[in-house]
Amino acid sequence: MTKQFLFSFFALMLYSGINYSTPRTTAAEDMVCGKWQMVDGSLVVQVYREEGEFRAKIVYFDDHDNTKPLDYWTDDLNPNPALRSRKILGMNVVEKLTYNPSTNSWEDGMIYDAKHGRYWNSSAYLTKDGLLKVKGYWHIKLIGKTLTFKRV
């Protein structure tokens, strides 16, 4: 009876350990989800997970001293003429990011620069201070631009 109890106990512990490892990974992956504002205040994005990848859409941008409402602006410079009439507000600007647990970062994504109508490779990571660093680059991570966001 004692052997059966010990076996059941260890089997339960083993199962519990396997069962709980997945949520911890998911929690680490989802740390990037939420609203983020560029440190200069010019842009706010909503990062979310959809279909196994992480994406970010614009929820606010500073249109500089222009009196037109934010939902007036369209993606005029998009290389695809069919997309030039889409609104910038609500547009996905980051797509295809996947979480890499070995580097604790999100990689292999694409970022869209609506100001220039260009797509770039992208990656992202969280700093120890809780800032989100998003890098846009052309094939080589060493060459590119990093944007810094704070959680809002």
Image: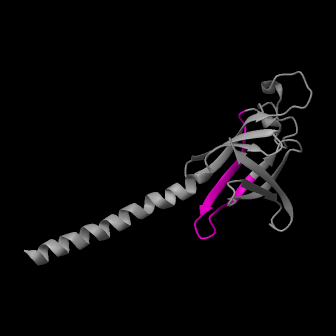
Q: Quadrant of the N terminus?
A: bottom left
Residue lying farthest to the right in this orientation = 65
**Image point 32% across, 64% down: which residue?**
16
Quadrant hosting residue 43: top right
Q: Residue at x 83, y 29 (%)?
A: 73
Q: Residue at coordinates 55% horizontally, 49% vertically from top-left?
A: 51
Residue 44 belongs to the span the image colors magenta: no
In this rendered view, identify the residue nearer to me: 108 or 79: 108
x and y, in percent, of residue 3 in the image = 12, 78
> Where is 18 relative to 72, above or below?
below
Judged left or right of residue 116, residue 83 is left
The quadrant in which residue 4 appears is: bottom left
Q: Residue 152's spot in the image, x, y percent?
A: 68, 40
In this view, 41 is above or below 147: above
The answer to which image quadrant residue 78 occupies is top right
Q: Position of residue 110 (x, y in %)?
A: 73, 54
Instruction: Write the start and end of the magenta stretch as one range.
Output: 90-110
Q: Residue at x 75, y 48 (%)?
A: 149
Q: Residue furthest bottom?
A: 3
Main secondary structure of the magenta stretch: strand
